[in-house]
Image (cartoon, helix red, strand yellow):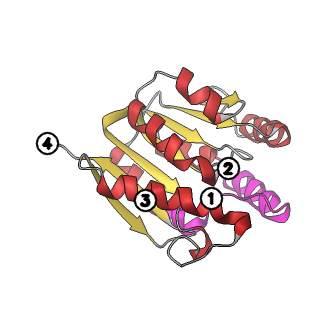
Amino acid sequence: MEEKNIIRIKENALKEHIPIIMDDTLEVIGNILKTNKPKLILEIGTAVGYSAICFTKYLAEDGRIDTIERDEERIKEAKINIKEMGLEEIIRIYEGDAVDILPTLNEKYDMVFIDAAKGKYPFFLKEALRMLNKDGIIFADNILYKGYVMSDYNKHKQRTAVRNLREYIKEVTENENLETEILEVGDGLAISKIKNS
């Protein structure tokens, strides 16, 4: 994988203020995936394809990534970036709203990466759990949302997002079938695995 191309994709995204996975978050996920070697990854929120491209180096042989994006400009950019990296066979973009697309998917995924509309995280979780392999892992990025989620933040603009992120945390930490840890890396990362009974 051409390191300089990845750096360029990252720098362009940052310059255009497109939210992409932070380095320390990527490092944590990478360390887990090194030992897990997922065959099939589902990503909710492609943006410009940066995280999906980064995840490909941890895939098992013949592995694949399905990623969902609704923003047409970002889809266009993601396609260019994925093509430049020679990964069109490995990364498949579903174009449209994840709320509509997820219920139509019936694959079993080894990893789900949630990084899309904050207000929809509980819905994404429900769908992710439905499609997660028994040894699978769900990563939810930006789960602490600039610190708002753990504070008494209640401003109107972000209220729905904060409320739904809190609901997500409640669901993954209180679900008896899940083992969850919340890390303060990047903007907060929730890592949930199914307990092996």
Which of the two labelled residues, at mark 1 and mark 4, occupies the earlier sequence position?
1
Q: With 110 as the anchor, is 174 left or right in this view?
A: left
Q: Amino acid at mark 1?
A: Ala
Q: Is residue 57 above or below residue 19?
A: above
Q: With 148 as the anchor, is 110 left or right in this view?
A: left
Magenta segment includes 8: yes
Q: Main secondary structure of the magenta part?
A: helix
Residue at disc 1, secondary structure:
helix
Which of the two labelled residues, at mark 2 and mark 1, occupies the earlier sequence position?
2
Which of the two labelled residues, at mark 3 and mark 2, occupies the earlier sequence position?
2
User: To which residue does mark 3 refer?
Assistant: 169
Tell me where residue 92 appears, x and y as whole percent: 64, 28
**What residue is rendered at 77% in x and 35% in y?**
79
User: To which residue does mark 4 refer?
Assistant: 197
Within-10-Å neighbours for mark 1: few <14, some 14–19, many 20+: some
Q: Amino acid at mark 4?
A: Ser
User: To which residue does mark 2 refer?
Assistant: 50
Q: Amino acid at mark 2?
A: Tyr
Contact, mark 2 vs mark 4 (Cβ under 8 Å): no
Within-10-Å neighbours for mark 3: few <14, some 14–19, many 20+: many
Tell me where residue 65 appears, x and y as whole percent: 55, 34
Which of the two labelled residues, at mark 1 and mark 3, occupies the earlier sequence position?
1
Contact, mark 4 vs mark 3 (Cβ under 8 Å): no
